[in-house]
Image (tube, rainbow, N blue to C red):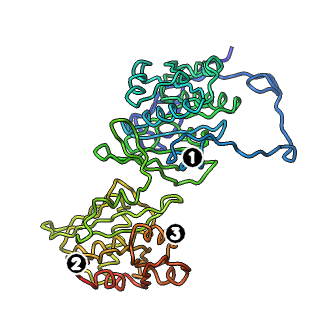
Amino acid sequence: MPKTTTKFVCQSCAYESPKWMGRCPDCGEWASMIEEIVTPRTNGKGRTASGHAPAAVPLGDIELADQDRTTTSLPELDRVLGGGLVAGSLVLIGGDPGIGKSTLLMQVSGNLASGGSRVLYISGEESPRQIKLRARRLGIVADTIHVSSETDASALGALVETCAADTIVVDSIQTMSDPSSPSAAGTVSQVRGSASLIAEVAKSRGIPAFIVGHVTKEGSLAGPRVLEHMVDTVLYFEGERDNAYRILRAVKNRFGATDEVGIFEMRGDGLAEVPNPSAYLLAERDEHGCGSVVCPTLEGTRPLLVEIQALAAPSYFPAPRRMASGVDFNRFLLVLAVLEKRAGVFLGKSDVYANVTGGLRLVEPATDLAVAVAVASSIKDVPVRRGTAVLGEVGLAGEVRGVSQAERRIREAARLGFDRVILSQRDKSQIQDGRGVELMGVRSVAQAVHQALADGSGS
């Protein structure tokens, strides 16, 4: 009879220790070490845990076939998934509580059911009655959606056979349990074991599965990091509760591009797609306001026009404040230092704030020049000329560097009616078709600020 042992596992990073510790020595989290019971498994020699002999297939004997994709009837979601659902794929969706994960999956379930598919919706967080109330609010009435509150992951295969399901939705993985592990639900071993059972059912039957995952207070997916490695696609649902817009971002996708985004608007009847996000993001922009600059950014393969705002106000503190929302704070400080040193814009006695409207978070360096021009516009109290967009990376020497796919960004600016774009001299020389847009190539931040604010009227 194998002897059971105990170990303590960190719920943040899966670090294991034979004794309890108040702080995890690996990730530094406090009170994250939870006791788990380990029962050794015994196998026959040369056999797997299921009793079968291991097998391998020559690479040349493997037949390739095109991946059939099933549309979710939500073009924004299909875009993020790479064109639709792939048979046998596992899609992990994470996000803050109340952001709309369950609403999105219920709408997907309704769309798939309307197309003739049978959906198995498993929820350990809500009762079937609560799920029915959400479906009614979303206007979903489908007898091919089967609801279960079963939390035993080993029973998933039987449920799929009973319902003849074509798609599985599990909300959430932290409520599921693996009966072979004596640990409590939500622990590292339970999440890992439950995900393994779900993956086995989905891949052996060739049906896609959606899995909802909780997030920590830092915004990352809770549980072991191995969970993200086990699934095929990892999506993050982002947004602020006081903002109607939601952003679905792909950070891992074995069947499509990563960093792809889809934009939704939360309404009373569910999530509505935003077909023209650039127009929505610029709808309330004050074109004559100081400190406002439009930047053509790239989210995945999609070009977007976003408004970057800056405010420079006299400081009453010994150390002026610096705050940034939507842009990387360290990158923001770098741009301010270059702006002061290389462009002669004195900021030593001013509080400086930067913000990206619409709740977007921009991480690419192509927004550097737009941030610099917005700050200069605010400190000089001179608006940027109407119809002008700005893009470019800023170097420490004050030079303006080129960005990737500049021509696609300019096409998006032209589509929205912008007639002038300030960009690096290198990008200007490489663009074949400006689509009627006046391209102003600059080599330095000082030159870009002068060109952007030369008119002085904003008209």
Q: Nearer the viewer, mark 3 or mark 2?
A: 3
Looking at the rendered structure, the kind of residue marked 3 is Arg
Please name the residue that numbered disc 2 is placed on.
382
Closer to us: 41 or 5: 41
Q: Residue furthest left?
A: 316
Residue 196, placed above or below residue 431:
above
- Between marks 3 and 2, how big is the CA–CA gap? 29 Å
Upstream in the sequence, badge 3 or badge 2? 2
Upstream in the sequence, badge 1 or badge 3? 1
Closer to us: 268 or 170: 268
In the visual, does 266 lie left or right of 299?
A: left
Q: Residues within 10 Å of mark 2 (few under 14, many from 20)?
A: many
Q: Residue at x 34, y 70 (%)?
A: 371
Labels 3 & 2 near each other (Cβ < 8 A): no
Q: Residue furthest top?
A: 1
Please name the residue that numbered disc 1 is placed on.
81
Upstream in the sequence, badge 2 or badge 1? 1
Looking at the rendered structure, the kind of residue marked 2 is Val
Image coordinates for residue 185, horizontal then vertical, percent:
49, 24
Q: Residues within 10 Å of mark 3 (few under 14, many from 20)?
A: some
Closer to us: 59 or 268: 268
SS for callout 2 = loop
Please name the residue that numbered disc 3 is placed on.
408
Labels 1 & 3 near each other (Cβ < 8 A): no
